[in-house]
Image (spheres, rainbow, N blue to C red):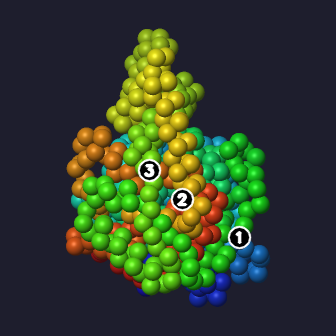
Amino acid sequence: MALNELTITEAVGLLESGEISAAELVDDCLIRVDAVEPIVNALVTVTYETAAEKAKAIDSRRAKGEKLGRLAGIPGIIKDGICTKGVLSTASSRMLYNYKPVYNATVVDKLEAEDFIMIGKANMDEFAMGSSTETSYFGKTKNPWDPARVPGGSSGGSAASVSADETLFALGSDTGGSIRQPAAFCGVVGMKPTYGTVSRYGLMAFASSLDQIGPVAKNVEDAALIFDVISGHDQKDSTSASMEYPAYGAGMKQDIKGMRVGVPKEYLKQDISGEVRQNLFDVMKRMEDMGAVVEETSLPTFDYALSAYYVIASAEVASNLARFDGIRYGYRTEDYENWKDMYKASRSEGFGDEAKRRIMLGNYVLSSGYYDAYYLKALKARTLIKNDFDQLFGKYDILLSPTTTAEAFKLGEKSRPIDMYVTDLFTVPVNIAGLTAMSIPSGLAESGLPLSVQVIAKAFDENTMLRAAYNLEQALQFDAKPDLG
């Protein structure tokens, strides 16, 4: 096995025993990046020199017997919408094509405190607006399983880089499924933490009440480790949860006998592929065989979630992207006569079509005469959806559903915006309600593409979710990989 194919847990063991060095591990990952990037285009930036230098420094510290962090020598990739000091952080937009932050996002500081090594920044849908990583200013990312298909989005670069073994893990952000959906399409593990458990400081905001940073990893154990590192209260983020944080992953390997599992029937009433449906039934049966109590249940407000999400998200993005004006930083048009022309032209040229579409929709639903009809109604629907989930978690420990309605679709296939938006159908309710959820690969379709299921838990109950996901992962033993040569 090549070193870049290792899991974090495996690599940590080999590094600590001295069987491999951080320099060797990072070098294998960078060789893999050079080999597959012409095919997948998962990265916007590769930090060759700084990664190699840090790897050598960590090896030197280890040789001297110095105390090292939990991720010492482990290579990782950061989504391009997360600020990294002195390294291009563009949100895959022309608007920020040359932006190098003067500070790190809190999650990056937390990873660096544990001695991880950043080897690159992941491609994404522009400002996280999209479900396929086709809206990036830096070109489309391809699915490692089939380069004619999308990797999902908006964290498509993060998922594709892990799936293609360019890295041992990546960070993404999840606003309406932007970690879980690409993880499902790329056959890896993707986790959306409870809103407030991971600092959003340094994350370029899309929809502030929905965005949450989380890990993409090769297995559940690795995702739990990264989540444990990046979680915690942050005074720099007013939405950060001030509470006592548990050791995430603790008790994960306990069995799930007696665990109560609900499967909302509304998910199965949607237009989903027969293979996705059968895969879910197979997973339900597997959980019953492990001693869980699996029942069909109902989430009555499910049908309102997607509409409410796009109203709320668009309203918030219209506000958040107003700061990008061509004056203070980022893209500025070269042809203008006065500041009004410059402002208009810079935004027109700097933003792509999808960003413009959502800004316009957001301003519309917030405008006088339409605020009550759309935005206020969406907020009320959000409350109803959350209440429905609260009732379900009074009866069940976790909920189970497909992550997506079908396997990864072809590049360019979803040409109508509404068709693209529907790909988030099964993931947006979790963000609307502020819950935690994880996508894990659970089988292969006849096409050879991965299928996945979504494990949902109540807010701040990540350890129950991780326990269910870990046990299911061990039972399914999904070990297929894409063939990129």
> Is residue 108 in view?
no
The amino acid type of the residue labelled 3 equals Pro
**Residue type for callout 1:** Ala
**Mark nearer the viewer, 1 or 3:** 3
> What numbered label is drawn on residue 247?
1
**Rounded to the nearest whole Å, what is the CA distance between mark 3 and mark 2?**
11 Å
Q: Residue at x 45, y 62 (%)?
A: 297
- Identify the element where label 2 is drawn: helix
Residue drawn 42% across and 81% down?
286
Residue pushed farthest top? 338
Label 3 packing within 10 angstroms: few (<14), some (14-19), many (20+): some
Where 258 sits versus 299, above or below? Answer: below
Earlier residue among tags 3 and 2: 3
Residue 172 visible? The answer is yes
Foreground disc of the pair 1, 2: 2
Does 166 sit above or below residue 65? above
